Structures are given as structure tokens and as C-alpha cells.
Amino acid sequence: EVQLVESGGGLVQAGGSLRLSCAASGITFDDYDIGWFRQAPGKEREIISCISSNHGTTYYADSVKGRFTISRDNAKNTVYLQMNSLKPEDTAVYFCTTRAGGPTRNLYDYAYWGQGTQVTVSS
């Protein structure tokens, strides 16, 4: 059974930082691409970042470029999302997701999802 477990969310003031983690099990982690999406109340789920299985390709949405960094530790089956200079508009539930076959921005291409972790940024 594939499981993705996010952690690291919380309440932070604007300008602060958080590091999200996504621990995966039930897959050969090295073969899978990982994506981070977020969903704010009343809004669609949107891509934030993704990283290819071999670390070679990363993508960032324009809204987070220069502030967020995605990385992975294949020895720990874990992907991280370092979030700096957080803004109130970053408030959302953050989800990690995984697929094999190349990272993609399309959420419908991903088969497995975590339960999400809440990030709240106060002004």
C-alpha cells in the first residue's frame, strides 16, 4: 500500500519559514517523481513544485519561485519543501503526491496523495 505522510505545517507570521516533509512508503522511492500542491478554501488545488525521481528536474510555480525550495533524500524516502518569506496568501492545505513517468504540473496525472498539512500565515 502506497502511503504519503506530510508533516511540518503550522501557524507562522508573515516573513517566517516552515519546512514541510513528505515521507513515502510502499513505493520504490527512487523511481517516483514527487509533487507539492496546495489548496486554499474555495480555490482549486494548484501545483507549487515538483521534483523528478533523479533530482534532475525541478519546477516551481511563479507564486513561490525564489521563496520555496524542493529537495529529496532518497535514503530516507522523504521529500522536503522549504518555505521562506511566507505570505498570508500562502495559507492553504499542502499536499504531496507521487507518480512515475516524469514530473507534471497536472494534478490529475498523480495517482497517490497524502492527507495534507495545514499552513497558516498570519499578517
Image (tube, grey):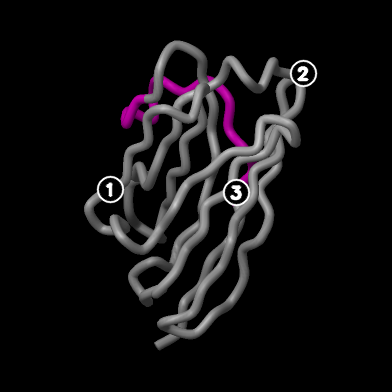
Residue 106: in magenta span: yes
Residue that carries the numbered disc 1 in the rendered image: 61
The image position of residue 105, as x and y in percent, is 32, 31
Q: Which mark is residue 109?
A: none
Asked if the residue at tag 3 contacts the one at tag 2, i.e. Cβ–Cβ closer than 8 Å, the answer is no
The residue that appears at 47% across and 42% down in the rendered structure is: 36
What is the three-letter code of the residue carrying label 2? Glu
Q: Earlier in the sequence, mark 2 or mark 1?
A: 2
Q: Which callout, 2 or 1, points to the residue nearer the camera?
A: 1
In the image, 101: left or right of 42? right
Residue that carries the numbered disc 2 in the rendered image: 1
CA separation in Å, label 3 and label 1: 19 Å
Q: Is residue 12 above or below residue 94?
A: below
Disc 3 crowd, CA 10 A, few/some/many (<14, 14-19, 20+): many
The image position of residue 119, as x and y in percent, is 53, 66
Magenta-colored span: 104-116
The residue that appears at 48% across and 30% down in the rendered structure is: 55
Q: Which mark is residue 116?
A: 3
Q: Is residue 8 above or below residue 4?
A: below
